[in-house]
């Protein structure tokens, strides 16, 4: 069985660039205020969702392993 992820968007950082929607249209949506949010807060590990997090110009997307809370993105330094 593959990893499951918890997806969060720090809405205080989100600038509404929509790069997350571009990279993972099934994973993210912008609301009426142009703030991003995950379509599902929990998801199977997914390269498109990871690409969306990596492409966010303000690193507003956090991905952690469901259960352990271990960071997937941004990685711990």
Image: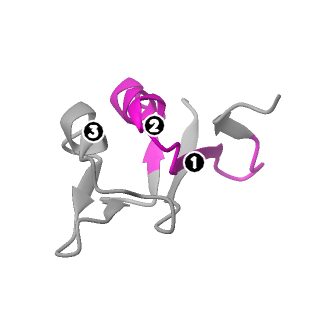
Tell me: 20 left or right of 77: left
Q: Which of marks 3 and 2 is nearer the N terminus?
A: 3
Quadrant containing the C terminus is top right
Please state which of the two labelled residues, at mark 3 or mark 2, is closer to the viewer: 3
Mark 2 crowd level (few <14, some 14–19, many ≥20, 10 Å Cα): many
Please state the horizontal and vertical placement of residue 49, each as a whole percent of the image.
39, 36
For the residues labelled 2 and 1, the Cα–Cα distance comes to 7 Å
The secondary element bearing badge 1 is classed as strand
Mark 1 sits on what residue? 62
Q: In this view, does 34 lie above or below 26?
A: below
Q: Do the residues labelled 1 and 3 touch (CB within 8 Å)?
A: no
Mark 3 sits on what residue? 19
> Which residue is situated farthest in the bottom direction here?
32
The secondary element bearing badge 2 is classed as helix
Please state the horizontal and vertical placement of residue 27, each as a whole percent of the image.
29, 47
Q: Do the residues labelled 2 and 1 touch (CB within 8 Å)?
A: yes
Mark 1 crowd level (few <14, some 14–19, many ≥20, 10 Å Cα): some
Residue at the image position 35 percent from the left and 62 percent from the top: 37
Tell me: 18 left or right of 40: left
Mark 2 sits on what residue? 53
The secondary element bearing badge 3 is classed as helix
For the residues labelled 1 and 3, the Cα–Cα distance comes to 15 Å
Please state the horizontal and vertical placement of residue 60, each as a whole percent of the image.
51, 51
Q: Are marks 3 and 2 in contact (CB under 8 Å)?
A: no
């Amino acid at each position: 069985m593959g990893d499951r992820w918890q997806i969060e968007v720090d809405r205080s950082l989100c600038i509404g660039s929509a790069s997350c929607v571009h990279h993972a249209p099934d994973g993210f949506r912008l609301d009426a205020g142009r703030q991003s949010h995950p379509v599902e807060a929990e998801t199977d590990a997914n390269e498109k969702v990871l690409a969306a997090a990596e492409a966010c110009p303000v690193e507003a997307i956090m991905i952690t392993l469901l259960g352990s809370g271990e960071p997937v993105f941004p990685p711990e330094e």
